[in-house]
Image: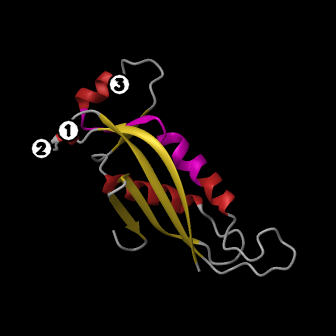
Amino acid sequence: MLITRRLEFDAGHRISTHNSQCRHLHGHRYVIEITLSGDIIADEGVAEQGMVMDFSEVKRIAKKELVDQWDHAFLVYSGDTQVLSFLQTIQDHKTVVFKSQPTAENLAITAFRILDAAYQDIYGNQLKLEQVRLFETPNCWADAIRNKY
């Protein structure tokens, strides 16, 4: 069985090597969809009976491990020294530094790696992260799929 939870967050970034508009500082209303697989929990009387995982728990983990860190932050490439230096002059600025350009593709892969470690099979139902879909705009997204990247 597959289940998916959708969350939204706002963040700024720029793609310093881009040849068009994305080389400028700008922001997005990102949407992240987290898809988990697992068996439906059949244990009588447990709160999760009939579920793969409670959707509120999927949300809690995603917010704690990823969304709360990236929300209203500037996502910057460590090699973008000009912007990184500027951001460091702003006291208490929320900045997240990445080893690669913060494209939708790289953010999806990073999100997958972070969340894959966070979702544990605590129910004994073979729970595992299958996919992270990261929307940069309503019409543009990247999918990080288990064993595909």
Horizontal and vertical percent for residue 2?
56, 76
Q: Which residue is mark 1?
A: 23
Residue closer to the observer: 23 or 117: 23
Q: Which residue is mark 3?
A: 87
**Is residue 16 in sight in this rendering?**
no
Q: Provide the secondary structure element on which disc 1 rests.
A: helix
Horizontal and vertical percent for residue 141?
34, 59
Image quadrant containing the C terminus: bottom left
Q: Residue 14's mark?
A: none
Q: Which residue is mark 2?
A: 19
User: Between marks 2 and 1, how big is the CA–CA gap?
Assistant: 7 Å
Crowding at label 2, few (<14), some or many (≥20) Cα neighbours within 10 Å?
few
Identify the image quadrant of residue 144: bottom left
Image quadrant containing the N terminus: bottom right
Horizontal and vertical percent for residue 27?
35, 38
The segment highlighted magenta reads 62-80
User: Between marks 3 and 2, how big is the CA–CA gap?
Assistant: 22 Å
Horizontal and vertical percent for residue 15?
23, 42
**Is residue 46 in sight in this rendering?**
yes
User: Between marks 3 and 1, how big is the CA–CA gap?
Assistant: 16 Å
User: Mark 3 or 1, which is nearer the eye?
Assistant: 1
What's the residue at 83%, 71% (across, down)?
A: 46
Identify the image quadrant of residue 68: top right
What's the residue at 14%, 42% (across, down)?
A: 20
Identify the image quadrant of residue 108: bottom left
Amino acid type, residue under disc 2 in the picture: Asn
Marked residue nearer the N-terminal end (3 or 1) = 1
